[in-house]
Amino acid sequence: MHLLALTPGQGFDPGRWAPVLQSGVHGFMIREPELEARKLLEAARWCRETAPDVEIWISGRLDVALAAGIRLHVPEAYPDPGDAWGPLSRPLHAESQWAARSACAQLLLSPVLPSPGKGAPWGVARLHRFLDGLPAPGPRILALGGLDPAHAAGLRHPRLDGIAAIRAFWDGEPARAVRRFLEAWGA
């Protein structure tokens, strides 16, 4: 099971970020649209130094990804940079997006469950129907949106690689959330 923690959009705070980075997550996505490039670059470099074994992503900032040597997540509203630039992560909000995004390294399928400020959720049944029809191998697929460890067991599917979350890692003890996700997943 792959666990990806997304930052909550409250700025770069090393004291708050370190416990999440060092909790046992496999990936960490910097999602801080209000931060300027220099501060994002500082945050990205700090993440790489603090947790060299964690896969670091940045949302929407190709310049920072290139300068820091990290991976790029391309948000929905951004133009697709194509496959000329390294492994990409993209959101997947509808089944119809699969053909255009299936060559990405990672897809964040969302929102799976109700999530503040997001559209109508997929729900577990729709998620599983979609995953049933996908070829293997393919990109890493992570469920995102309204998820906590209590939902992990019900999401399990051979084509789902894990879970991406914000609140599950930031609202409480992140290492405990990682343990609970892994236990529920059976990993």
Image (cartoon, helix red, strand yellow):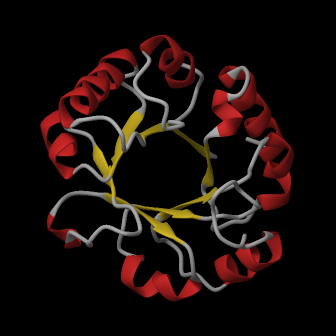
Against 138, residue 115 (above or below) is above
Q: Residue at x 76, y 61 (%)?
A: 113
Q: Residue at x 21, y 73 (%)?
A: 82
Task: Pick whichever, 53 or 125, lies toward us.
Answer: 125
How many numbered marks have been drawn onto this rendered protein structure? 0
Against 114, residue 147 (above or below) is above
Q: Residue at x 57, y 81 (%)?
A: 94
Q: Is residue 34 left or right of residue 109?
A: left
Q: Is residue 185 left or right of residue 132?
A: right
Q: Quadrant of the C terminus?
A: top right
Against 43, residue 148 (above or below) is below
Report x, y in % for residue 111: 65, 64
Give residue 121's quadrant in the image. Answer: bottom right
Task: Pick whichever, 5 or 24, lies toward us.
Answer: 5
Q: Is residue 185 left or right of residue 81?
A: right
Q: Residue at x 73, y 65 (%)?
A: 157
Report x, y in % for residue 24: 58, 26
Report x, y in % for residue 18: 49, 16
Against 161, residue 58 (above or below) is above
Give residue 180's quadrant in the image. Answer: top right
Report x, y in % for residue 76: 41, 68
